[in-house]
Image: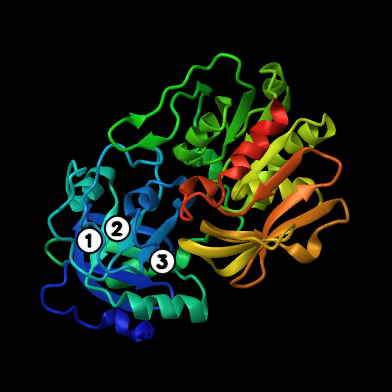
Amino acid sequence: MADAASSLAPKPEGATGVLVLSDGSVLWGRGFGAVGDAVGEVCFNTSMTGYQEVMTDPSYAGQIVTFTFPHIGNVGVNDEDLESQVDGAVGCVVREDVTLASNFRSHGEFGDWLAAKGKVGLSGIDTRALTRRIRLSGAPNAVIAHDPEGAFDIPALLRKAQEWPGLEGMDLAKVVSRTASEEWEGSIWTLGEGYGHPSEEGRPHVVAMDFGAKDNIFRNLVQAGAHVTVVPAETSLETILELKPDGVFLSNGPGDPAATGAYAVPVIQGLLERDVPVFGICLGHQMLGLAAGAKTAKMFQGHRGANHPVKRLEDGVVEITSMNHGFAVDNASLPDSVEETHVSLFDGSNCGIAIKGKRAFGVQYHPEASPGPQDSFYLFEKFVGMLA
């Protein structure tokens, strides 16, 4: 990687895109998708499939995703694989140019879809080298830019990258959350049938707090037997209790859990005091930990991909999981009232907790993403089973 002086180096012939890191490194490539620039934290994702789901996952708000798998975009995009209608990742970095879509489910081209969504793409990058840089030095702040004419003000882009405050201390949940309550409809997708629509009659009622949720989580809750009402991130304890929930779900989401927890943790603590069953995923898991007295911390490089092994401490079973998080519950800070239930086999970090004496638990990974593919669906069944 180059130093800050390289910001003044001429661009290679034909370069229409660039990634400018806050340390002054400049990576030239070919832009696609939206024209313009976006600032964010550069991370990497090791998934071989699911790029559309990744780009529409609200947990990636404020991030630029480097895909380690080289062939991104080759199956196009469709209207069924969106994880949300709100902003997710601001851009993506890929190795190979996006080829014409070749898949029977495709409704369009990845580059056109990115442009319509206002997301910047950059191809022709040595993603292996960039991933190694992130692993060794941590996730940097950067600006990703695309101009078909190749006209870039590199010093200005560098200043923008350096002035961006970063994700630590940033509450992004209220930026990507729903602004009104919604009765969720639909269960999981099956080929040839689409999303299921089972009867809501006789189902336990789950109120889901939306901190930047993936829609497939709600589909899995329905599949497990629940009726789901989704409420905004800043919904008060009183409003939630007025909905008469049998249980409350805490969703995934972007940003620093401690920042979002400033308003969410007191609500969660109120639910725990009333012995309302609670289930949290990712950010929701982290805030459940905060509510129980644990601490969270920014990770050096985070976990993002569909191949992360997690050990269930109860019986030693290993689940292959999907992850997307840059913060984690500090397992050394867990109070005696909290049991650690899962750990990462990559680095030993916390991946699951249960509150002793309460019907409350959370996991750091994403069981709805089904990388196993069915390793973790039991968690939805476990939660809904508490409510029957």
Q: Which mark is residue 2?
A: none
State the residue position of label 1.
Answer: 146
Q: CA distance from mark 2 to mark 3?
A: 24 Å
Q: Give percent across and percent down for residue 261.
A: 68, 45
Lower sequence index among marks 2 and 3? 2
Task: Find out whether the residues at labels 2 and 3 contact each other: C-beta distance under 8 Å.
Answer: no
Task: Find out whether the residues at labels 2 and 1 contact each other: C-beta distance under 8 Å.
Answer: yes
Label 1 Cα crowd, 10 Å radius (few <14 / some 14-19 / many 20+): many
Residue type (three-letter) at the residue carrying disc 2: Asp
Residue at image position (84%, 33%) is 273
Residue 294 visible in image: no
Q: CA distance from mark 2 to mark 1?
A: 6 Å
Q: Nearer the viewer, residue 47 or 272?
A: 47
Q: Give percent across and percent down for residue 66.
A: 36, 66
Q: Is residue 152 left or right of residue 276?
A: left
Residue at image position (88%, 56%) is 336
Residue 94 location, quadrant? bottom left
State the residue position of label 3.
Answer: 46
Residue 226 location, quadrant? top right
Residue 47 location, quadrant? bottom left
Q: Which-is-in-front pick, marks 2 and 3?
A: 3
Lower sequence index among marks 1 and 3? 3
Tag 2's secondary structure? Answer: strand
